[in-house]
Image (cartoon, rainbow, N blue to C red):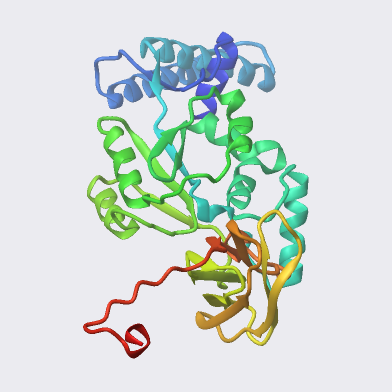
Amino acid sequence: MSPLTRFLEWLYGEPNSVAGQGVQSSVVSTWPWPAWVMLVLFLGSVGLVVFVYVRERIEAGRATKMLLLAIRVLLVALVVFMLYGWMRHRYRTDLPDLIVVVDDSASMALVDHYEDERLRAALAKRLKAAKLDELSRLNLAKLLLLERDHRLLDELNERYQLRIYWLGGTARAVSAEAAELPQAVRRQTPEQSASRLGAGIRNILETQRGRPTAAVIVLTDGITTEGRSLSETADYARRKSVPLYVIGIGSSQPPRDVRLSDLLADEVAFAGDLVNFDFKLSASGYAGKSVRLRLRRENSSETLAEKTETLGDDETTASVRLSYRPVEKGELRFVVEAEPLPGEADLQNNRLTQTINVRDETLRVLLVQEYPSFEFRY
């Protein structure tokens, strides 16, 4: 907006804009003739005034003559200005939409490991200032929008029609007024079991059909579990002439994690028999570290069997066996677990459960033979 337009709006006491709208103003003239005609008329008038003052014989000082000459020239300029018939046109326009997409799939709950302690401390300090707790990926995305008293959200709301979407299995629009947006962002939790980034963003672009869209900004860790990839959607956005900006959230280092999987054990056993619990152990970010594995009954802290394993390189899988002789009969539920290590990103995959039906009864065996045995005959 030009300084002249700002001055006129201030002069008339009109607001620059209202929520969701922009203001454009233009000043045009109604003079029908070309500009050179007005220029010739103005210069001719000025020349006439000067000629009259030069020829006129009056008893006045030089300063007085120059002042009177300047007044006449200004009057001529004012007349020329009024002849132009200036008019001011003012009209409101819809602001373009700005789409902000925040990934809220389960992977955004991960707390990444940062080897640079200064970086980690700086991020923790900024999170605390924004009243956010743990250093999860979703909280880092929230930090960009909420820090410094949600200044970024306020600025975007002034310049655009801001639309925020949560994206996991599906894209869901945040239905909140501008004043309530910060709290709506702060309350969100990463609970979506699927991550369909490509399909979700494409659906958002299709809903924007026919509306001016300034850009689509995506805050995500980049993990897509189902559907189209982000690169496919980027091609689609390019064809629609919509800028797509993807901001990666998280650390470039793999998350530090210990995982148990593929538990195998007999579903039926007899009291006093040895039962083997076989499972897979894998880890990332803990090469050379030791982890304690133990077997216990559910709802009991008593250790029934344990073993200490040394973890290998990232994505290396080891087979582990824990054995136990149950003496109590009934349907028993056992838990195999790995004790948490410092800095683990996910503790939910540190345990596995197995239900075993333990029986204590006499077995009756029927032996069928083709002919009578010696013991039977004699």
Q: Residue at x 63, y 63 (%)?
A: 345
Report x, y in % for residue 89: 38, 14
Residue pushed farthest front? 378
Report x, y in % for residue 202: 29, 45
Q: Quadrant of residue 304?
A: bottom right
Q: Is residue 175 visible?
A: yes
Q: Residue at x 36, y 48 (%)?
A: 243
Please give the count of numbered marks on the rendered protein: 0
Question: In terms of depth relative to the viewer, which is nearer, 317 or 11?
Answer: 317
Question: In terms of depth relative to the viewer, which is nearer, 80 or 200?
Answer: 200
Q: Quadrant of residue 65?
A: top right
Residue pushed farthest bottom? 374
| Above or below: residue 300 compared with residue 69 | below
Q: Residue at x 37, y 87 (%)?
A: 375
| Above or below: residue 189 compared with residue 251 | above
Report x, y in % for residue 104: 50, 46
Report x, y in % for residue 113: 65, 68
Quadrant of image for the C terminus:
bottom left
Question: In terms of depth relative to the viewer, which is nearer, 295 or 193?
Answer: 295
